[in-house]
Every structure is written in structure tokens, then in C-alpha cells.
């Protein structure tokens, strides 16, 4: 295994290599879907063209890569087929992002327009401004639903044994269910005064761990014919890593650079998202600071200066450092969970490297 | 085969028998899901409780019944297993209805509250009125997504051969894709001045035939191991029947009794839906009547008296009679498509009976 300094180069190169392969597959997939949609109408084609642009405009492709490496833990044949199948996870990701941005009323995604805004603009160009936001939202709901169908289609048509495909589809369904439950809690938690660590951890487990790390790893592993014991080892790696991913996300949401993260710094605070980072600060800060933070949460008109004040509180209470240490500890826990396993060596090394990468990422 | 007079009794009894079995399965399914959701939180449980009430509050259960009879065309063993699997279609139906009502801003479904209104009320009881409509819509988007996961889960866990399950899942995906395309056309057509018969037929084919008749029949048939030729015969039955179903729906939308149909008469006109019934009337009526109809389409404030005027025009131009005759002709076409096939006799008889039932239904 490499030292942290080497890792940055190696893993970045590896990720770039897979990102290129995954994007190439997505290109081919969408070009077929654009053809298919054109056979119906130019209107359906236009929506699919926009879905393609939206999906290909960026993103780390972490979920397909985890799917590929869940497979590679146990198998080293049919690598092309697993890369083909892995794009299912990126299609699922686009589906969740589109529906998420509608719910959160976010206008930007990956530094460009959210899907419902693209469709609102489309409406205005083609049919005028009357009720164009509603048109945009409706089209985006349908586009999300369509992507969900695409994601399944890719798995169903993959070249693996039908019984393995079935198990992978069941894992896929498990993700969508957990994300649904996580969303329900997110929507209710935003309205509730209570701010409870267990509840925050439950949402992270449901939304991030299941969907970013554990689910994709399980899907890949199941396509190779994984047994229950294999899945358990992957879960022992995926759970702490998923939590670390989310905490790092919260840190970047408040301290990250907008040009790198692709979303406005502090938008989590404006949306009233309750994170462990903020919870820790609330426990340690003075009463007037506590009041200030609680007022800021969910205040859509919060200025950059006001966010600076919150940033200072989070730093001064030691909450930033605490969270950074927590991330580092969780990454170690993840890496330790697989290092003595029977998984293939190159897969174990890659999964360790990507865990360190996630812990130190800036986007 | 029975004469139309007998059929009304027989088919109603048969439908009631299956509805009872399907509802029983849905009860058991949802009670398990409510338990599962409670293990996460009382908030997730509450949403699933509402999904259960919503799904069980009514509905003809035509889609699961078509799924069962698609299977019965070719097989007469494992009937319990196909009834278990068939509820997948009803879960899918709930998913589409919930998302549909959000898009159409319909407040009622099956004579009671639409799902986003249920959730808006839930928000107001628990957290107050602030932004409660948005809470309702967000929760309903998630509830739809959750139902979609449930629908797949039922198929994946069904007791049939994995390769047959995979093919059924591919057919399921085919339905969701077609409905998505149909929705895109629906959303755009509402904005467009043009009123084109081909375009209306395309939407009917995508949204009704695929989703109400052809898709469910194919899923059932594929679970029994159907071949391509079997599917083709089922399509020859399902396509005219799906179109007849939609035209009958349009007739009921304008001439039906609200107490039977469960939705306000004339709501299609208020929503600006373009139907063959209206298209035919537009071609035959006087210029001032034409202007009146075009103005009425999409006018949400249309009064009952104004809808009466449109009803009179549709009747006087012979469009109602024309549509009724069209339905009868399509039903005959559907029945003829299967009568000489190699399908099992009791299934052929039932499919003929249900076709006549659809052509004469009042709800």
C-alpha cells in the first residue's frame, strides 16, 4: 500500500482512467437513447438530449467506480461487462439529483443549471413564460423517472447470470428504498426544532452510506456471485467510509471553495440541513452564538458575511478539527475492515486508496 | 363465450373475486412495509401508512388482473405465485397516480384527497402551515419513488425462474419508459396550439395501452416463460383494447357520473387535455362553437354550465356516438385477435369478457 503522498497521484490517475471509460459508456448509452426517443418525437428527444448533457457535465463517478471494485474484489474476468453495467449507478445518481434539486428548490447543480431550470428555460423558448416554472418541475419529475428506468434497464441487460442480476437488482431496490426513507426524514427534520445526533446519523446511513458506498459495492459484488459473508465485509468497509464521505461533504459545504465543489458555500445552512459539524458547534458555543446559528439555519437570505460568522464559530469551538479527526478515524476503520480479507489484492489496495482520497478530497 | 347480457354478471363477479384476492395481498404487503418503515422512524411509518390507505382506497385492479391473465394464457400452475406477483402492477399504478396528481395539480383522486394534499395536511398538523404545500409535494415525490421501489421488489422476489423474472422486469422497465415519453408529450402538447390526431394516438399508445393492457399482460406472460410469438398475440389484443379504454375514459370524463368515476366531470377540459372525442367535435362544429371549445380547454375556472355547453356540442356533432362506435369496433378487434390463438380457453374467455366490460364500464 502507498503512503498518503503517493496516493494523491496514483488514485487521481486511476479515477481519471475510470471516469473516462465510464463517460465513454454513458456517451454511447445516451446516443442510443436519443435515437430511441427521436423515434417517438422531437420533444422526447430534446428531453433525453438534456438528460445526457446533465449527466455528462461532471461528477466524480464514485458510484460506478465502487460498483466496478465491488466486482473486482472477487473476480477478474469480464471487466468490460462490469464497466458497462456500472453506469447504472450514475444514471441512478442523475435521477436522485434531479428530484433532489426540485425538492430543495436548488437552481444550480455542478456549477450549471439544475434540470428543472433547464426545462423551464426550454418552455420559455418554445411556448412562452406562462407557468414555465411548473412546466420545468413537471418535466424534471418525468426526466428523473425516465432515468430510473434507464438505470434498471442497464442492469437487466447486463451480461451476467440471471440469478446474479436479480440479486443486484434487489440490492438496487434496497438503495432506492433507503434513500426514500432518508428523504422522508430529511423533509421532516427540516421542520423540527429537535437536533439529535442519532437522527442525523440515521439519515447519513440511509442516504449516503447506502447509496454512495455500500449499495454500489454490493451491486458489483453480487454481479460476480458474491455470498452473504462477502457483502458483510464490504459493509464493514462501506459504512464508516460513507459516514466519512458525508462529514467531509458537510465540511466542504461550509469551508470548501465554490469553484471546486460546484455549489454555493453555505447553501447547506441556508437550506436548514442539520449536520454533525453544526451539532458539535452548537454543543460548545456560547448562548448568543447558539441563537445565531439556530436562526441562520433555513434562512434563505443569509449573506456571505453571516456565513463567515458561522464558519468562525465552527472553527473556534474546535468543531472543524473534531470533524476532520472523525473523518480520519473513520477512513482508518474502513481500510482496516478489508485489509485482512480474502478479497483480491489489487482491489483491496484500490479501495484503501480511494478511502484516503475521500477523506482528503476538496470537491 | 357468453352473450353481452350474461357477461355483465359473470365478469363483475370474477373481477370482484380477483379484486378481493389482490387487495388481501396488498394488505399483507403493506403491513410488512409499515413494520419495516417503523424500524427506521415513526415519520417514515406515517408515510407508508398513508401510501397503504391511498392504494387500498379503491380502483378496479385491472392491471394486476391483466398480469394474472397474461400468465393464465399459457400456464395453470403456481396461480398463487402469480397473484402475489401481480400486485407489482398496482404499486406501479399508485406511483404513477401520485406523481401525476402533483403534475396536474389535482387535489382529488378516487373521490378522496390526492397524496400531496394528504401530506400537506400532515405537515400542517405536525409542523404548521409554513410552506406546507411544498412539504406535501416533496413528500409525494418521495412516496412515488418509494412505491416504484416496492413495485420492483415484488417482481424481483417473486417465485418464478430468474430468467423469466428478468424478462418481466425488462417489460416493466419498458412500461415506465413509455409512460415517461407519454408524459413528456402530454406536458408539451398542453402548451401547443396544434391538435393532431396522430399525436393524440401516440400518447394513448404510450400511456394507456402500454401501461394498462399490454405491459401487464406481457409481464404475466413472461413470468410463465412466454415466447416472442405469444407476446405478439397479446399485443394484438392489448393495443386496440388500450385505445378503447382511453376513449371510454374520455367519454366518462365528460359524460360520466362523478359519484361513479371518482373525479369531477369535465376536469379533462379544465386541464386542457386533448382527446379524440374533442378533436372529432372540433372538426364538425360551427366556427363559434370551435372558438368556445378552444377557449375552454385549459381554463381552470370553467363552470358546470359551461361544461354542459361543451357536452351538448360533442353530442350534437355526433362525436359521442362516433366515439362509442369506435370503442365497440376496437373491442371486437381485440377479442378477434385472440379467439383462434393457442392460449388456454378459460383465459381467452375471460379476456374477451373483460374487453366487453371495459367497453361498457361506467367507472
Image (cartoon, coloured by chain):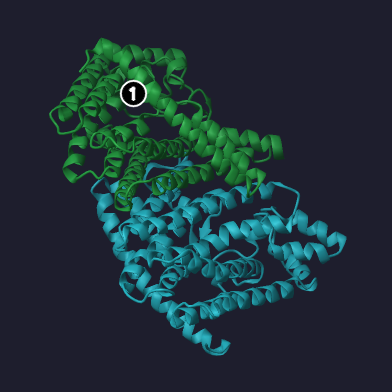
Chain colours: A cyan, B green
Residue drawn at the location 33% of the way across and 13% of the way down:
B9
Query: The numbered mark 1 sits on a residue in which chain?
Result: B
Of the pair A136 and B205, the residue shown nearer to us: B205
Quadrant in which residue B326 is drawn:
top left
Q: Position of residue A97 (x, y in %)?
A: 49, 56
Question: Residue B210 versus residue B322: which sits nearer the camera?
Answer: B210
- Residue hosting label 1: B250
- Horizontal and vertical percent for residue A196? 74, 55
Secondary element type, mark 1: helix
Which residue is located at x 54 percent, y 80 percent?
A339
Report whether B95 appears left or right of B178.
right
Horizontal side of residue A268 vs A73, given as left or right: right
Q: In the rendered view, would you say B60 is above or below A267? A: above
Above-or-below relation of A119 to B15? below
- Does residue B296 appear in the picture of this structure? no
- Image: A33 above or below B115: below
Which quadrant: the C terminus of chain A?
A: bottom right
Quick one: which residue is furthest to the front in this view? B77
The local crowd at label 1, few if under 14, some if 14 to 19, many if 20 or more residues have their Cα within 10 Å, is many
Picture residue at 50% right of the left edge, 64% below the top: A110
Q: In this orientation, which residue lies closer to the viewer: A53 or B64?
A: B64
Residue B129 picture location, percent across and down: 68, 36
* Residue farthest along the left direction in this orientation: B340
Does B239 appear above or below A181? Answer: above
Amino acid at each position: 500500500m502507498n503512503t498518503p503522498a503517493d496516493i494523491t497521484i496514483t488514485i487521481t490517475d486511476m479515477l481519471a482512467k475510470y471516469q473516462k471509460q465510464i463517460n465513454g459508456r454513458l456517451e454511447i448509452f445516451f446516443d442510443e437513447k436519443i435515437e430511441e426517443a427521436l423515434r417517438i418525437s422531437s420533444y422526447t428527444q430534446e428531453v433525453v438530449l438534456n438528460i445526457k448533457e446533465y449527466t455528462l457535465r461532471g461528477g466524480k463517478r464514485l458510484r460506478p467506480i465502487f460498483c466496478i471494485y465491488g466486482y473486482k474484489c472477487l473476480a477478474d474476468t469480464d471487466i468490460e461487462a462490469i464497466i458497462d453495467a456500472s453506469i447504472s449507478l450514475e444514471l441512478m445518481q442523475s435521477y436522485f439529483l434531479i428530484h433532489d434539486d426540485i425538492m430543495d428548490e436548488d437552481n444550480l447543480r455542478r456549477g450549471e443549471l439544475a434540470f428543472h431550470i433547464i426545462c423551464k428555460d426550454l418552455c420559455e423558448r418554445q411556448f412562452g413564460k406562462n407557468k414555465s416554472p411548473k412546466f420545468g418541475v413537471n418535466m424534471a419529475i418525468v426526466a428523473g423517472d425516465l432515468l430510473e428506468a434507464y438505470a434498471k434497464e442497464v442492469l437487466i441487460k447486463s451480461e451476467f447470470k440471471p440469478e446474479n442480476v436479480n440479486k443486484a437488482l434487489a440490492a438496487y431496490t434496497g438503495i432506492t428504498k433507503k434513500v426514500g426513507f432518508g428523504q422522508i426524514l430529511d423533509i421532516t427534520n427540516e421542520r423540527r426544532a429537535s437536533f439529535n445526533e442519532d437522527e442525523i446519523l440515521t439519515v447519513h446511513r440511509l442516504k449516503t452510506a447506502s447509496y454512495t458506498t455500500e449499495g454500489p459495492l454490493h451491486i458489483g459484488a453480487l454481479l460476480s456471485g458474491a455470498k452473504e459473508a462477502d457483502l458483510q465485509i464490504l459493509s464493514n468497509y462501506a459504512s464508516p467510509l460513507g459516514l466519512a464521505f458525508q462529514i467531509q461533504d458537510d465540511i466542504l459545504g461550509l469551508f470548501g471553495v465554490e469553484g471546486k465543489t460546484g455549489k454555493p458555500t453555505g447553501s447547506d445552512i441556508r437550506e436548514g440541513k442539520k449536520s454533525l459539524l453544526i451539532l458539535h458547534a452548537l454543543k460548545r458555543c456560547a448562548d448568543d452564538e447558539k441563537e445565531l446559528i439556530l436562526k441562520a439555519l433555513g434562512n434563505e437570505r443569509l449573506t456571505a458575511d453571516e456565513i463567515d460568522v458561522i464558519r468562525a464559530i465552527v472553527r473556534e469551538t474546535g468543531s472543524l478539527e473534531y470533524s476532520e479527526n472523525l473523518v480520519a478515524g473513520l477512513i482508518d476503520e474502513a481500510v482496516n475492515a478489508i485489509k485482512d480479507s480474502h478479497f483480491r489484492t489489487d482491489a483491496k489496495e484500490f479501495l484503501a486508496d480511494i478511502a484516503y482520497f475521500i477523506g482528503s478530497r476538496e470537491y
